[in-house]
Image (cartoon, rainbow, N blue to C red):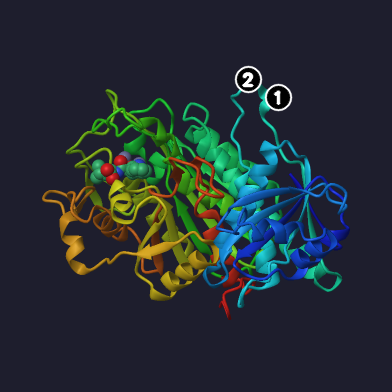
Amino acid sequence: MKISVSKGKVADTSCEATILALFEGKELAGAALQIDTESNGLIGELIGSHDFEAKPSQISVIYTRGSLPAKRIVLVGLGKYGEFNLDKLRAAFAKAMQHLRTLNIKGAAASIDVNSPPPDRKDKVAQAVVEGALLGLYQYAPFKTVDRENLKDVEQLTILTEENDFPLIKAAVEEAETIAHAVLFTRDLVSAPANRMTPAILAKEAGGITGRRGVSCTVLDKVKLNELGMNSLLSVASGSNEEPKFIILEYKGGGTDAAPIVLVGKGVTFDSGGICIKPSDKMDEMKSDMAGGGAVMGAIMASADLQLPLNIVGLIPAAENMPGGTALKPGDVFASYSGKTIEVINTDAEGRLILADALAYASNYKPAAIIDVATLTGACVIALGDDVIGMLGTDDKLKKELQEAGRETGELVWELPLWESYHEPVKSDIADYKNYGGRPAGAITAAAFLSKFVGDFPWVHLDIAGPAWADKDKTYIPKGASGIGVRLLVEFLRSRAGQGSVAGGS
Ligand code: BES
Ligand code: ZN
Ligand code: ZN
């Protein structure tokens, strides 16, 4: 969908449909009042009769019948004024655009004159509107061959703004489009079936990001991984016919000697569980076990497109976890890249194995911060549910920054403790560490294991096992791959670069 920004008023704009977002129980103001006046009270009548109460994401379509240049007014509810946040706006615009799509409307205009309460700025409002519209309309259909003509899409959205706000809104809309496109890129990677998204294909997709200024990509293959002693990554891949890849994406937008931020993403292109094979119910969803790697790729894509003044490195250990005659077995022991030895208790705890080598590799960059993103544990889903990212780490400032980025983007993170006592269960009898510490506090002991391979650098681990894949439609996340982590990381990076909305981001 093409998005443009125009100076103009809703009441003067001719189009198939104009979207107008309203608060529940609040008097009409701004664009809404103007339209109501010019149309002889079309909106007021609907509200007065309680047909439309502006409940969150409620939709009502009014046919203007010549009283306005727009053929239809699509009203969408924002809920109560006092309960407003940007996620409500994303949800409302996702819903409105989805409704337009079902009506087979190709072009629409939107007022972003929502009179939202402070401190939400107009550029933030514009950003949320664009994100809601683009993310809400996502469809993954490359393998649909039948009835393709039914795959409707809205082609054009014009955002209307006042003369004075035009430069601010135009810049915000363009940045939001850039970020949303990176999310859609990540969703495509995660949606792809595992036979179409092998470690080699994921590496090729990473190579595709390098067209941008400052981005380079290096892929370490099996021979190189053997040479480097990345046995923890190799061990996970050993049961599969697909060879592992270690993907290194580097974006240089900062000073030559500025320490980079290293993003590490779990890239298990399919997690069968290996010898500790998973039950078959929902095993298909384990094609999404590279969502962390996908999020890192999307974040680097957006950072380069925005030309952020930072150095950023993306490390994506990619492997397929399969059973087989050469597969890793429970009880196996090997030396990881760090030199520390690992005893494998459960071959389904493979994410932490591949991350162990990638986190140790991150030290080579002497990074300013390390953030890993992984669909790591079912235990995190049990603890926090489907919508929230679990966060653990060693650096309070970094954690705070990510929490703030979470609030801003709606990609909420919640911290779990990483106290001393949680490290005990991952000590091994015969090796340094074991990859499974039992069911209690499973998300935490997984992070405790990871921490053993992180050097002395600020580090945060984000467990996205819950929100990476939506089992049902959620406002602006249609059922399937969510692309979670991309907007969170980009918001964090923008505020590190002093460009985000987080006051005084350092
Ligand atoms: N990829 C899974 C975690 C996961 C679960 C992601 C649900 C998305 C949704 C991970 O590799 C895994 O299998 N974890 C096991 C670990 C256990 C065997 C130690 C788990 O959490 O059950
Ligand atoms: Zn697993
Ligand atoms: Zn996994």
The residue singled out by tag 2 in the image is 145
The residue singled out by tag 1 in the image is 149
Find ligand 2 in the image and state its quadrant.
top left
Residue 89: quadrant of the picture: bottom right
Determine crowd level at label 1: few under 14, some 14-19, many 20+ residues with C-alpha closer than 10 A. Answer: few
Q: Secondary structure at mark 1?
A: helix
* Residue 142 spot, x, y in % from top left: 62, 28
The residue that appears at 40% across and 50% down in the rendered structure is 374
227 displayed left or right of 129: left
Q: Nearer the viewer, residue 152 or 319?
A: 152
Q: Secondary structure at mark 2?
A: loop
Residue 261's disc number = none
CA separation in Å, label 1 and label 2: 10 Å
Q: Nearer the viewer, residue 433 or 307?
A: 307
116 displayed left or right of 266: right
Q: 229 above or below 8?
A: above
Determine crowd level at label 2: few under 14, some 14-19, many 20+ residues with C-alpha closer than 10 A. Answer: few
The residue that appears at 36% across and 69% down in the rendered structure is 456
